[in-house]
Amino acid sequence: MASKIEELAAQIATLDEAQQRAILDRVAELNYRHGLTTLSEQYRERLRRSNELNRSVDEILAKLKQTREEIAARDYS
């Protein structure tokens, strides 16, 4: 694995600056997507464990509204 990474790094080093930037941007985008996917899976698992995975959108929005109002009442009274 390390030799593959070294080989890839050597190939990238031969590219011009614009191509290197494009690769770095693409890697950042892929990492971001991967992070969002991981976060989504973790959140979905948490909802499943707490038996809230199948709640309706209306229930979720009502709970968020209630939470927002509680925070506003507490912090901005």
Image (tube, helix red, strand yellow):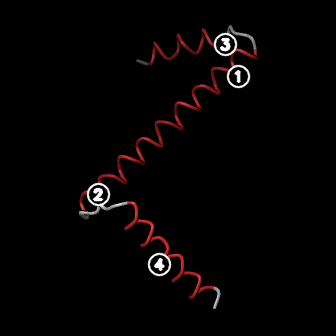
Name the amino acid type tagged 4: Gln
Name the amino acid type tagged 3: Ala
**SS class, disc 2:** loop
Q: State left or right for residue 22 relative to residue 39.
A: right
Name the amino acid type tagged 1: Arg
Residue position marked by numbered label 1 in the rendering: 21
Q: Nearer the viewer, mark 1 or mark 3?
A: 1
Mark 4, residues whose alpha carbon is within 10 Å: few (<14), some, or many (≥20)?
few
Q: Nearer the viewer, mark 4 or mark 3?
A: 4
- C-alpha span from label 4 to label 2: 19 Å
**SS class, disc 4:** helix
- C-alpha span from label 1 to label 3: 11 Å
- C-alpha span from label 1 to label 2: 40 Å
Q: Position of residue 62 (x, y in %)?
A: 43, 72
**Any mark on residue 49, and which?**
none
- C-alpha span from label 4 to label 3: 54 Å
Mark 2, residues whose alpha carbon is within 10 Å: few (<14), some, or many (≥20)?
few
Residue position marked by numbered label 4 in the rendering: 66
